Image (cartoon, rainbow, N blue to C red):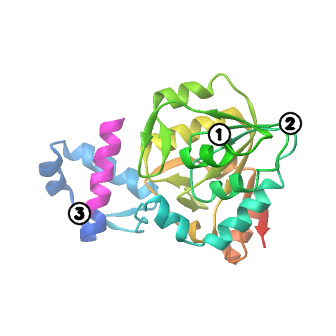
Amino acid sequence: MRQTSQRRAAILQALTEHGNVQVNELVEQLGVSAVTIRSDLSALESQGLARRSHGGARLSRTPPPEQTIPQKDALNHEQKERIGACAARMVQAGDNIIIDSGTTTISLARHLHDAENVTVLTNGLNIAWELAQAPGVDLILTGGLLRKQSLSVQGSQAEACLQAYSFDKLFLGVDGFDLQFGVTTHHEAEASLNHKMVERAKKIIVLTDASKFGRVSLHRIVQLDRVDTVITDASISDEYREGLLAAGIELLIAD
C-alpha cells in the first residue's frame, strides 16, 4: 500500500510539473508494468486529479502544495478564529472529544480554556500545548511518530491508541473538501489516522475555511456520507452551500 501511494504521489508530482505524462515514460522511470501505471492513472482520474488520454494522462485539477504550520496559520486567520469559536459552542460539559491536528482546529482549542469536565484526545502537539493550560480539560495525547511539517503525531502507535476509546465528537481539520471525492489530506499516514478517528467518534464535525472547498489532495479521509456537520466562513460558494445541504450535512456559518 505504501509503495502504491508513493508511486501515485510521484505520478501526481510529474503531472503537476509537466501538465501531462506518458505511460511508457512512467514505466521506465518507476520500474513497474504498463498495466500498473494505467491502474494508477485510473485511480488518479477517479479522484479528479487527472484525465486519461491516449498513451497517458493530463492534469485535471492542481492539488494545493502542503504548507508549514506558520504559513497555514497566517492564511485566513480571522475566519479560522471565528470557526474555532463556533465549534467551541458545540462542546458541552462531560463531552469526550477528539481534536485533530491543524491550524483551524487549534482555534477551537484556544476557545476551550474555560471548558468544564471535557476530555480531549489529540494528535497535535500545538493543540496539546494550548490545552495544557485549560484546568477543566483532561488531555490525552496519542503516541506515534512526530511529523514536524504538521506538528502531528501519527502512525500505527497513534492508531492503536484510539481502539480503547469511544468519543462523542470528532473535530476534523482538512486540506481539501470536494463534493464528489470527499474529505482529503496531503499525507497518507495522516489520512489513515484521521479515518480511524472517524470510526471512533459518534459525530463528525469538519472545520474548514471556505478556501478548502473544491480542493482535492492525494489521500482521502472519508466520503461525505460520514460527515455530520461542516463549520466554515461566510465566503462559501452557493454551489457548496447547496451541495452540503443536499447531502444532508448540517452547515454552520461562523460570523
- Under circle 3, the secondary element is strand
Task: Write down the region rendered in magenta.
Answer: 1-14
Name the residue located 47 percent from the left edge and 28 percent from the top edge: 156
Q: Amino acid at mark 1?
A: Val
Name the residue located 86 percent from the left edge and 45 percent from the top edge: 92
Horizontal relation, residue 193 to residue 187: left or right? right
Q: Amino acid at mark 2?
A: Gly
The circle on residue 21 is 3
Q: Is residue 10 magenta?
A: yes
Q: Earlier in the sequence, mark 1 or mark 2?
A: 2
Residue lying farthest to the top in this orientation: 164
Dot 1 corresponds to which residue? 198
Q: Earlier in the sequence, mark 3 or mark 1?
A: 3
Residue lying farthest to the right in this orientation: 93
Snapshot quadrant of residue 207: bottom right
Q: Which of labels 1 and 2 is toward the front?
A: 2
Q: Residues within 10 Å of mark 1 (few under 14, many from 20)?
A: many
Dot 2 corresponds to which residue? 94
Q: Which of labels 3 and 1 is toward the front?
A: 1
Q: Is residue 54 above or below residue 106?
A: below
Q: Amino acid at mark 3?
A: Val
